[in-house]
Structures are given as C-alpha cells and as structure tokens.
Image: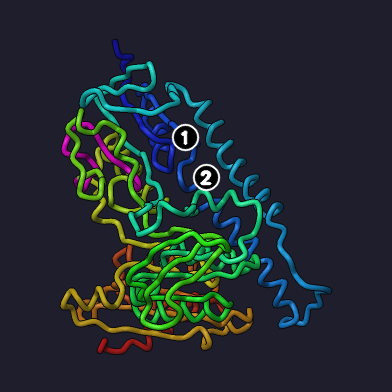
Amino acid sequence: MSEAFDAIIVGAGQAGPPLAGRLTASGMRVALVERGLFGGTCVNTGCTPTKTLVASAYAAHMARRAADFGVVVDGPVSVNLTAVMARKDAVVGKSRGGLEAWLGSMERLTVLRGQARFLSPTEMQVGDTAISAPLIFLNVGGRASRPDMPGIDRVVTLDNTSILQLDRLPEHLVIVGGSYIGLEFAQIFRRFGSQVTVVEKGPRLIGREDPEVSAAIEEILTGEGIAIRTAAECIRFEPRPSGIAVGVDCQEGEPEVIGTHVLLAVGRRPNTDDLGLDKAGVAVDAHGMITVDDRLQTNVPGIYALGDCNGRGAFTHTAFNDFEIVADNLLDGAARRVSDRIPGYALYTDPPLGRVGMTETAARATGRRIEVGIRPMTRVSRAVEKGEALGLMKIVVDADNQEILGAAILGPGGDEAIHGVLDMMAAKQPYPALQHAVPIHPTVSELIPTLLGELRPSS
C-alpha cells in the first residue's frame, strides 16, 4: 500500500525546495525525494563552487598585476590548490547545510532519500517505500555528457564534477569544448598556474554568440596564455606515457595536443533515464528531455517537469522561475507561461559576459529591420580606471517599433550591468525610455544610454 501525499517532488535542486515551501504553506502534505546532495547542480557542482574558484583565480590574477597599480608584491604569486578547494568546500557546505536545515524545519514535509521511480502516473517507489499523489513534480536536473568519441574509453577524463575534487594542479589541462563551462574552467586553471589548451569542434568559441563577442572572448583568453584550437573536426584520445594525446585535426597547427589532464565540457544530459517514465506514460524528446507545455505540465495531467530536465532552460534562475510559474498557476490562479520568459545568462570569465534576449544574428533572421549599437570597453571610463578595458558592449533594437531585442556586455561587471537592459525588456519599454535615463558616473551601466544614441542599421 502506498503512503498518500498531496504532492511529490523529485529532486532538491533549485526548484524543488521553494516549491515544497509554497505547497506545504498552502496546507498540502508533501514528499520530497532526493537521491544525492541537497541543492542540486548549482550548490554542489555548478554556480556556487565554480564562482568560488573564479574568485580565487581573480585574486591570483590581480596579485600578479599588482605592479600595474603601483602596488608592490614581494616574490612570485603562487596558488595553494588545497586551500582554494577547502574554501570552496566551506562555501558549498554552508549553502547546502542551510538548505537542509530549512527543509528539516518545514511542517507537512516528508523527506525521503533514494532513487524515485514511477509505478504509475500517480505512484512512485523510493527504496522499499511506495508513495502516491495526484501531483508529481520532477526536478531531477542533469549531468555532464560523455559522448562516444574515438578512444574515449581508453583514457581517464574529468567532468565539471570531478575537476572540483582535484588535489593537485594539472600541469597541462586540455579542455574539450569551447563553450561556457569549458571557458570558465580554462581561465580558472590558467590563473592557478596550469598550461591550458581549449579544443573546440566548431569554427569559433561559444558559437551561439555573435562573431565579434566570440572574437573578443578569444582575445581575452589567448592574452592570458590559453591556447585555442578551433575547427577540430575529429577529436580523438590516446593514452601516452606523458599523459593523454588529444587528436584535433584542425585546419592549422599540430595535429594533436598532449595533456596531463583532460576535461570534457561538451554539454549536459538530463537525469531522466532511470525514472521509469514509461510506467507513467511521460513523453521525452530525442535528447531525453521531458516534454512540457507552456505551464510546464507534461503530456500526463498532474505531472510537471521543472529545471534542467525539461529543455526550457539550463540555468539556476530559469529553474527557480519554473517553480514560480508552477506555484503561481496552481496556488494563485495565475496564467503565467514559460514562453513569456526573456532569456538571460552570463559567462563568468573575467571580464564576464552578460547576455539578454536575441543576438544580432538571431534578430536579423526574424526579418525585422534592426539597428545595432557597439562600443569597445576601451571607451568606457570605469573599465579604463579599473585597468580592465577588455571586451565590448552591444545592443540590438527593432528600428520600427523601438523594442529592445537583445544586448551583450562583455566587460567589468557585465553580468550585473546587463540587468538594466533586462529590466526594461521585461517592462516592455521602448529603448528611448532607457536612452533618456540619467545613470550614475562612473559606471559601466552609464554607457548604455550612449550606446543607444549610437544605433546604426545592421548591415
């Protein structure tokens, strides 16, 4: 016999715990099932630990640049990886511990540890316990992909989880994948003191961005001594006495790179293959993502999917927004839709890239008549004053209805400054409303109105 609940939540990532809070506060009895660590990817292997490492890497970088600011640092700057990782673990532990304590104090919540599998559309099995509920919310997250590349089974590779457990610095870290995760780790470990090579199958880094943004990021990374190998058509692996040989078959340069460590950063896959979704009749796409509608409900009434497993966003903030959409619709009678969400994200290299809305390439593909403003960070006073005048600012608007379509800020505080644009887009304000604002000097954000004043037709 199943123990009956009003709702079951599978996964204690970014959407699960706050949803449990809203549901229990409304009077529901809720079961929250977690097989691993509370907090999901963000707290344990994503945002929290990596941004802690980014902070340590930045401190080392600025210490080496001390003379540029008239500051004297005696002797060479080195990094104690053991201390860096201990700091990271302390930050992660505090965040996870706080979450566990909050869930433990929640009335009407039962926490179950173990793997959840469907028995039917309303029943699940967790170890020896059977539970049932008319509402089931899947917040199961994702994990690193390990594609079937030639020779991959003959070598040991790192992923975004295992690299966080290193106890000694790689002599030469080869990163396969030139996108967000790979580039963040590339700069982190280069600043820690490793030799780093990034291997990317595509013709340029972070191919979803506009070409000038990709080029600017590559310039920043190569300027710090990171080797970039793009157009790697056939990536393959082979063990060698000195490490791991990574075949790249690039159009130029040596045909292979030999590293002591290899990090695979080639995408992620959802944790949906061991839920028994077929027993509930829940549909998935070709990539294993759970198919959902605009209210995040699956094809089976009463079953919802939130976060990385639904293919509607792969960020902490989109997972949390999934929770808000579901909770408001179910408990407050709202009519919120995931399609109303304005896409925004950041790449946490230094300087960071803040992005919102469409790229110029995507906007042009819609057939609109668009205008674009671009300004290099060398013309942004705040960036020059900080000695960090790398990167650029870019904004794209609809020339006919004055709608802001998207923006990119690659520069100091770009991940924060982008919110001025994001907020105006969310408020559905035309770009003159932002252009006529009076921002604070000296900031990076103050150049956004200037950027809008320099709009030109997209060629």
- Kind of residue sitting beneath label 2: Asn
Q: What is the secondary structure assignment of the residue under circle 1?
A: loop
* Left or right, 294 with reference to 27: left
* The quarter of the displayed image where residue 385 is located: bottom right
Q: Where is residue 202 in the image (x, y as percent from the top left)?
A: 33, 72
How many other residues sit within 10 Å of disc 1, few (<14), some (14-19) or many (≥20)?
few
* Left or right, 320 with reference to 328: right
Magenta segment, prevailing SS (helix, strand or loop): loop
Kindly identify which residue carries mark 1: 36
Residue 44 numbered tag: 2
Which stretch is magenta? 293-308
Disc 2 to disc 1: CB gap under 8 Å: yes
- Kind of residue sitting beneath label 1: Gly
Query: Is 232 above or below relative to 238?
Result: below
Query: Is 117 above or below relative to 360?
Result: above
Query: Is 11 above or below relative to 239?
Result: above
* Left or right, 301 with reference to 446: left
Q: Which of marks 2 and 1 is nearer the N terminus?
A: 1
